[in-house]
Amino acid sequence: MFDLQRDGDVFVLRFDDGENRFSPAFLDGVHEALDTVEKADGPRALVTVGTGKFYSNGLDLGWLSANGDQAEAYLGRIHGVFARLLSLPLPTVAALNGHAFAGGGMLALSHDFAVMRTGRGYFCLPEVDLGMSFTPGMNALLQARLSRATAHEAMTTGRRYTAEEALSAGIVQHIAAEAEVLPTAIGVAAALAPKNGAMVGKIRTDLYRPVIEALGGPAF
């Protein structure tokens, strides 16, 4: 389900579970990987990437349908992953190798920067078409990481953005051909790895304090 490797100062966390939906096991694995990265010595940065045509399709709707009585706790755990990335004491880059839908798109936006594959794959917030709303924490995250106009369009229309459209809308910061997505993300992360990780985390935590609080993140 996960592969965590270190490439110089950059840790690469690969999601390899089909659509990489947020099953309880997936969420556990993300936290375990972040524990390892956070405890590592020396300069470091993190890149996350999916496999095949999916970065992540977000919530595990099948699991949620079968475990509706646990919905609140489940959403809280997802919020916890977003909040942890926003407060992580090191630079982070999402390498969008394919589709980043719904919670998968929000996972990408919880990173400092994102590199998106051209030619295949979309960024999309399809909740409006699924008959779902956004939690207050998700609303806070999306409004903080996207411009007002982009957040409005993405959230109310469910538009599917290509890499070029996502770059123009400010959803991602870099685009690259399939073979260059991960190398580009590693390059961005490697350039940032020498930054003082504790200070990166402090600045980002202060910058997104209302979002982290809305997500139910750690107390300040």
Image (spheres, rainbow, N blue to C red):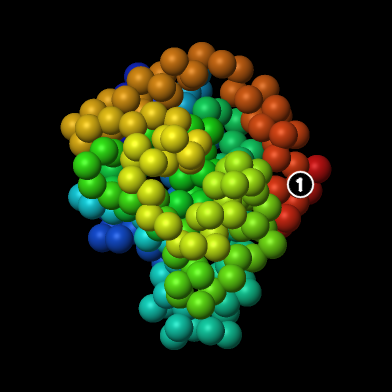
- Which x, y percent locates residue 185? 36, 28
Name the image quarter holding the C terminus. top right
Can you say whether 38 is above or below 210 in the image? above
- Which x, y percent locates residue 147? 60, 42
- Which x, y percent locates residue 19? 30, 61
| Residue under the point 55% across and 28% down | 90
Q: Nearer the viewer, residue 52 or 84?
A: 52
| Residue under the point 48% across and 39% down | 169
- Which x, y percent locates residue 18? 26, 60
| Residue under the point 34% across and 58% down | 20
| Residue under the point 23% across and 52% down | 53
Disc 1 secondary structure class: helix
Q: Nearer the viewer, residue 164 or 81?
A: 164
Name the image quarter holding the N terminus. bottom left
State whether residue 121 appears in this view.
yes
The residue that disc 1 covers is 210
What is the crowding at mark 1: few (fewer than 14 residues within 10 Å), some, or many (at least 20)? some
- Horizontally, residue 106 falls left or right of residue 141, namely left
Can you say whether 137 is above or below 110 in the image? below
Which quadrant of the structure image shows residue 22?
A: bottom left
State whether residue 13 appears in this view.
no
Amino acid carrying mark 1 in the image: Pro
Q: Nearer the viewer, residue 12 or 132?
A: 132
Which quadrant of the structure image shows residue 200?
A: top right
Can you say whether 82 is above or below 191 in the image? below
Which quadrant of the structure image shows residue 197?
A: top right
Can you say whether 197 is above or below 49 in the image? above
